[in-house]
């Protein structure tokens, strides 16, 4: 936006040197940028007590922003946590089926956070959490090229050659999945442990691929997301990534 352009309808005294309202709300941990835009569309966001009607509205530190009548604090510095998600929890803030959620089980001292991607109800392991919704969206993008690595226990006789062929990608019911690095780690009776790594991480991708191959998944644990590792983090525990490590791995946020 140039100095001669008119402010969008709903612009309320913020300077053009600020940031878009959806990005501000995402960085403040209110919601992802996409969900923030939905809040705006629903008329639930106000700046200086004026309803925001345009997602291109800009705000800065002098503006008072409210969502559903509640004042939104200025965004804190960007923070990131590693969380060892147990199975049996859904990765959502509100579940229509009233199942227990990740965010209900987090320690009360944490600020409001959003997850980087999701793990489904029956999956466990590393889930990254951040107070910066814009960062969460950025880290979810396949263009980052980050590997998501999993340990998977399956029932059935696993053919290593079939696993190796997944590196070329696979099409299931008309859906094309990208290359998956998969290897057989161990076998005990009818159970096998596999290590699988992928970059896209579509919804239930590993389960769908293995089911297509005739293997029943009995346990799925994410052990790494890009450079961040589950390590020895206890089940249900949360640990903040030190600021120095965060700046080294994500220099663009510094």
Image (cartoon, helix red, strand yellow):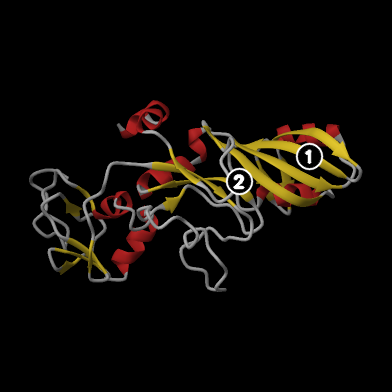
Left or right: residue 41 compared with residue 195: left
Percent x, y for residue 150? Answer: 66, 40
Q: In terms of secondary structure, where does tag 1 sit?
A: strand
Q: What residue is rendered at 13% in x and 47% in y?
A: 16
Marks 1 and 2, how far apart in space?
A: 15 Å
Whether the residues at callouts 1 and 2 have beta carbons within 8 Å, the answer is no
- Label 2 belongs to which residue? 125
Looking at the image, residue 18 lies above or below residue 248: below
User: Which of the two discs, 1 and 2, labels the residue nearer the N terminus?
Assistant: 2
Left or right: residue 153 compared with residue 10: right
Q: Residue 193 carries which label?
A: 1
Percent x, y for residue 108? Answer: 40, 58
Looking at the image, residue 94 lies above or below residue 1: below
Left or right: residue 247 compared with residue 154: left
Quarter of the image that includes the C terminus = top left
Quarter of the image that includes the N terminus = top left
Q: What residue is rendered at 80% in x and 47% in y?
A: 154
Q: How crowded is mark 1: few (under 14 residues within 10 Å), some or many (20 or more)?
A: many
- Residue sitting farthest toward the bottom: 97
Q: How crowded is mark 2: few (under 14 residues within 10 Å), some or many (20 or more)?
A: many
Left or right: residue 69 compared with residue 36: left
Percent x, y for residue 68? Answer: 27, 71
Labels in figure, total: 2
Looking at the image, residue 150 lies above or below residue 236: above
- Residue sitting farthest toward the top: 248
Q: In terms of secondary structure, where does tag 2 sit?
A: strand
Q: Residue 166 carries which label?
A: none
Q: What residue is rendered at 47% in x and 68% in y?
A: 94
Of residues 59 and 186, the one drawn nearer to the viewer in this rendering: 186
Percent x, y for residue 115? Answer: 46, 51
């Amino acid at each position: 936006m140039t100095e001669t352009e008119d402010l969008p309808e709903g612009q309320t005294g913020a300077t053009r040197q600020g940031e878009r309202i959806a990005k501000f709300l995402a960085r403040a941990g209110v919601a992802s940028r996409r969900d923030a835009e939905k809040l705006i569309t629903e008329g639930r966001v106000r700046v200086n007590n004026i309803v925001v009607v345009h997602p291109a509205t800009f705000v800065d530190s002098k503006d008072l922003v409210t969502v559903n009548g509640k004042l939104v604090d200025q965004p804190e510095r960007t923070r990131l946590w590693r969380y060892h998600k147990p199975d049996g929890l859904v990765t959502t803030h509100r579940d229509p089926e009233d199942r227990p959620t990740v965010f209900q089980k987090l320690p009360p001292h944490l600020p409001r956070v959003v997850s980087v991607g999701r793990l489904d109800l029956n999956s466990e392991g590393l889930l990254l959490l951040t107070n910066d919704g814009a960062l969460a969206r950025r880290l979810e993008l396949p263009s980052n090229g980050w590997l998501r690595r999993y340990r998977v226990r399956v029932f059935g006789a696993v053919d290593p050659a079939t696993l190796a062929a997944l590196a070329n990608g696979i099409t299931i019911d008309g859906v094309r999945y990208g290359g998956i690095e998969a290897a057989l780690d161990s076998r005990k009776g009818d159970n096998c442990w596999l290590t699988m790594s992928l970059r896209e991480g579509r919804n239930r991708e590993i389960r769908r691929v293995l089911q297509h191959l005739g293997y029943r998944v009995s346990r799925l644990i994410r052990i790494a997301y890009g450079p961040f590792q589950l390590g020895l983090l206890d089940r249900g525990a949360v640990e903040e990534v030190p600021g120095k490590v965060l700046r080294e791995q994500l220099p663009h946020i510094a």
